[in-house]
Image (cartoon, rainbow, N blue to C red):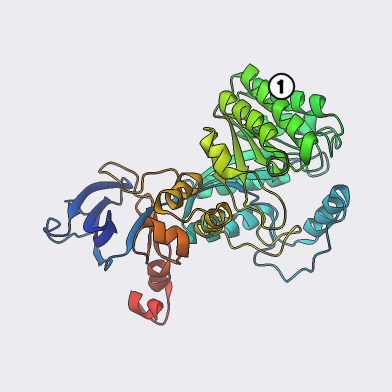
Amino acid sequence: MNNTDLILRNVRMNDELHHLIIDQRKGIITAIQSAQGEAGGMSQGGEIDCGGLLYLPAMTDKHVHLDKHFLGEPWRPLQPFVTLPGQLAFEKEMLSYLPTAPVERARRLIELLLRQGTTSIRTHVDVDPELGLQHLEGLLEAKDEYKDVMDIEIVAFPQQGLLRSASVSVMREAMAAGADYVGGVDPAGLDGRVDASLETMFELASEFGAGVDLHLHDPGQLGLYTIDRFTELASDAGLGGRAAVSHAYCLGQVGEAEFGRTAERLQRSGVAIITSVPIDRPMPRVTGLLDAGVEVFVGCDNILDAWSPFGNGDLLARGSRLAEKEGWIIDGDLLRAFPLIGGAPLVPKAGDPASFQLVRAMNPMHAIAAAPGKEAVYSRGKLVGGRMYEAQHLQTSDSYQAVQS
């Protein structure tokens, strides 16, 4: 045992208690021992008795907007959504009033997501001829600052419409500057040219060796055509596993036969569906997609922004909402939620990254059903969130028990 080792005693996994030994310098779990034995004596890196807290892997949020929230800002009343162009103008106006720079807004949301147990994200960032690369530059700076605790993928996102806002040139600049994915939005409803919009996205992706992640709100048959064309282009480009359609409300609006055909195309092409699990509109049939072998991921999306005053970045709670909406009540179904919000195994092994959360729950099924608060969040061996983290930062008390009460 070396000087950087941390021992977490009495962590619950597989209905049994274990000791986790963590090399904080390397950021990995070096050993897992049954709590019935001893964990190799005292550690100079410290010890914590976790008292039976449940181990869960850290989470991955596949759809956030680090640059467009109002966290830490004065309350700003919103307006009802009427039309997409109207809402886009409203958002642009509200963002122009914010006194904080994009990098500071990114820091605020990254810190919130870490506290909530998320250590990996895909963020969309607005680019257009007016904004240029201002937001992207801020996010790239934040990405570098947090590289030791948060993995960040960046999607260059022409929110005002790729063709509608003449953003092809600035998108090319964004990809050259370091964005990982080409974004787009509503090729029909906003750009007005489905094929041209999609083909331009994939041409940019090919030019820069990037993935593609499309915002798709267009409903019904229009949305379905867009997805079918997207899967064709993804297959032609060999982008299986690096292409996704976000939102895809249409997959909750069409008949079973049409849904089945499109699900089969998604599976064959390796195109994933990303949902924020909306409660105010149709959403993709997640159970049907999973049964068809389609990859599905969950993201929090709006968090106190021009579109919605709701959201707290808790992806475990979002997974719970998904399970409830899908009617997942038996144990096997409840467990289906975890790959959509994380992906790492529910039980780690020696050598795995020490990125996980500890919660007060009996087992993973209970955790999805109850969505308990985080007692501790570790990212690569560093304590970054939860009540243990708060206790360490309290001025009035240095005890974890004080935060529990």
**Which residue is nearer to you in this view: 398 or 283?**
283
Question: On the rendered structure, is 80 left or right of 20?
Answer: right
Question: On the rendered structure, is 151 left or right of 217?
Answer: left
**Which residue is nearer to you in this view: 288 or 208?**
288
Type of amino acid under label 1: Glu
**Which residue is nearer to you in this view: 94 or 34?**
34
Question: On the rendered structure, is 345 left or right of 137?
Answer: left
Q: Residue at x 73, y 71 (%)?
A: 75
Residue 1 visible? The answer is yes
* Rendered-image quadrant of the C terminus: bottom left
Residue under pointer 1: 203
Residue 70 locus on image (x, y percent): 69, 62
Residue 140 visible? The answer is no
Q: Which quadrant would residue 239 be assigned to in this image?
A: top right
Q: Residue at x 54, y 46 (%)?
A: 121
Q: Residue at x 52, y 49 (%)?
A: 145
Residue 27 locus on image (x, y percent): 33, 47
353 shown above or below 266: below
Q: Residues within 10 Å of mark 1 (few under 14, many from 20)?
A: some
Residue 317 locus on image (x, y percent): 52, 60
